[in-house]
Image: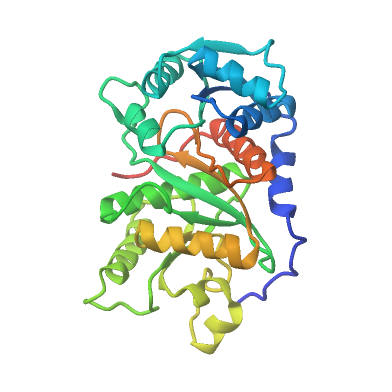
């Protein structure tokens, strides 16, 4: 089992994302309902950094008022009027479906409202993949980017959904330049227990990878969290694996586990994050009101990389 590399400086993983996107053309992005200072400022700053080319969609008067409150000049940005957030989400999907936008970015509306428009019949943005969210975390003390999926969309995914969640996460990692990311399928224990569905799913996902139903990464599981991220813990338990202790991607059993894991790393370990929704025809940038500027910009950079990476084909 390989030794853990030296710890990278805090923040370096998100800066690396930004650097990877530096020489790429900005992504024409439909910014949906940016009617508060945070969402309009995030879109304008990402545009100033040449990560995106914002197209603001929402009630014109409220967008202009938000820009005035934030003391921002948006005179040079395209603005598409929409009566309310539902109409803004619908118009953004229509724009992306006909090629007028290469990404969607959440403004001041609920995530559910945005995703409902994306998955609606006739939106033109659905694919044969289940959509899933991927966090890319810079965790102090961890020597590489750590991807977590899915902590935001799929509540209690079955095995078929988990297959897509894993493939989406692998595709995201490969878009970031990881040629063969190491994927740890998490459970509470590292052995298969017929009474714990998460361990059965983990074992099945690993076999699906053996059969070409998941491609582009190296899978192992079930693995407990300590065995996934600590070489010492894996060695102590006698686990021999190319993934144990060296995981690039953590696949959680359900949204509760993923949400709690990600937020614990944010608030107790001072982790920084970027995030993107995979599985639609265009990447979807989901930002939170509590996200700092670096997270918002890194999420845009991640969308740039994902948009230019072709999704991996696998056996269904």
From the viewer's perspective, is residue 289 above or below residue 115?
Answer: below
Q: Position of residue 48 (x, y in %)?
A: 74, 25
Q: Nearer the viewer, residue 276 or 42?
A: 42
Q: Position of residue 164 (x, y in %)?
A: 36, 47
Side of 236 where 42 appears, left or right: right
Of the pair 49 and 182, the residue shown nearer to us: 49
Q: Residue at x 30, y 77 (%)?
A: 192
Above or below, 214 relative to 43: below
Pinpoint residue 158: horizontal percent, then vertical percent.
25, 55
Extreme residue toward the right, this view:
9
Tell me what residue is drawn at x 32 percent, y 32 percent: 116
Count of numbered tags: 0
Res 26 seen here: no
Position of 2 with respect to 15 (left or right) is left
Describe the colour scheme in one phrase.
rainbow
Residue lying farthest left?
195
Q: Nearer the viewer, residue 50 or 178?
A: 50
Q: x and y percent of residue 163 in the render?
A: 34, 52
Q: Is residue 146 above or below residue 186?
A: above
Residue 59 visible at all: yes
Q: Quadrant of the C terminus?
A: top left
Position of 225 with respect to 290 (left or right) is left
**Residue at position x 45%, y 63% in the image:** 260
- Residue at left 56%, top 12%? 79
Instruction: In the rendered view, tell whether residue 65 sits above or below residue 46.
Output: above
């Amino acid at each position: 089992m390989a030794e853990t590399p030296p710890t990278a400086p805090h923040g370096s993983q998100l800066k690396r994302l930004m650097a990877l996107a530096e020489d790429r053309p900005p992504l024409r992005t439909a910014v949906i309902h940016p009617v508060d200072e945070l969402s309009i400022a995030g879109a304008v700053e990402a545009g100033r950094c040449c990560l995106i080319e914002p197209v603001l969609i929402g009630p014109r008067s409220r967008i202009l008022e938000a820009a005035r409150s934030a003391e921002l000049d948006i005179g040079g940005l395209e603005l598409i009027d929409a009566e309310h957030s539902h109409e803004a989400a619908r118009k953004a999907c229509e724009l992306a479906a006909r090629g007028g936008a290469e990404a969607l970015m959440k403004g001041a509306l609920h995530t559910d409202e945005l995703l409902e428009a994306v998955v609606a019949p006739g939106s033109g943005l659905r694919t044969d993949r289940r959509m899933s969210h991927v966090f890319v975390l810079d965790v102090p003390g961890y020597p590489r980017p750590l991807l977590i999926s899915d902590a935001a969309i799929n509540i209690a995914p079955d095995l078929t959904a988990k297959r897509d969640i894993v493939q989406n996460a692998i595709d995201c990692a490969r878009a970031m330049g990881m040629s063969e990311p190491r994927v740890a399928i998490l459970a509470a224990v590292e052995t298969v227990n017929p009474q714990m569905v998460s361990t059965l799913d983990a074992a099945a996902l690993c076999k699906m990878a053996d059969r070409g139903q998941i491609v582009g990464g190296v899978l192992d599981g079930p693995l407990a969290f300590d065995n996934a991220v600590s070489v010492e813990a894996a060695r102590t338990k006698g686990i021999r694996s190319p993934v144990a202790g060296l995981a690039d991607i953590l696949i959680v059993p359900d949204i509760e586990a993923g949400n709690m894991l990600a937020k614990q790393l944010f608030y107790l370990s001072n982790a920084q994050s970027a995030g993107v929704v995979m599985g639609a025809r265009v990447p979807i940038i989901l930002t939170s009101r509590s996200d700092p500027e670096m997270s918002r910009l890194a999420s845009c950079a991640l969308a740039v990389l994902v948009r230019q990476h072709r999704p991996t084909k696998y056996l269904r």
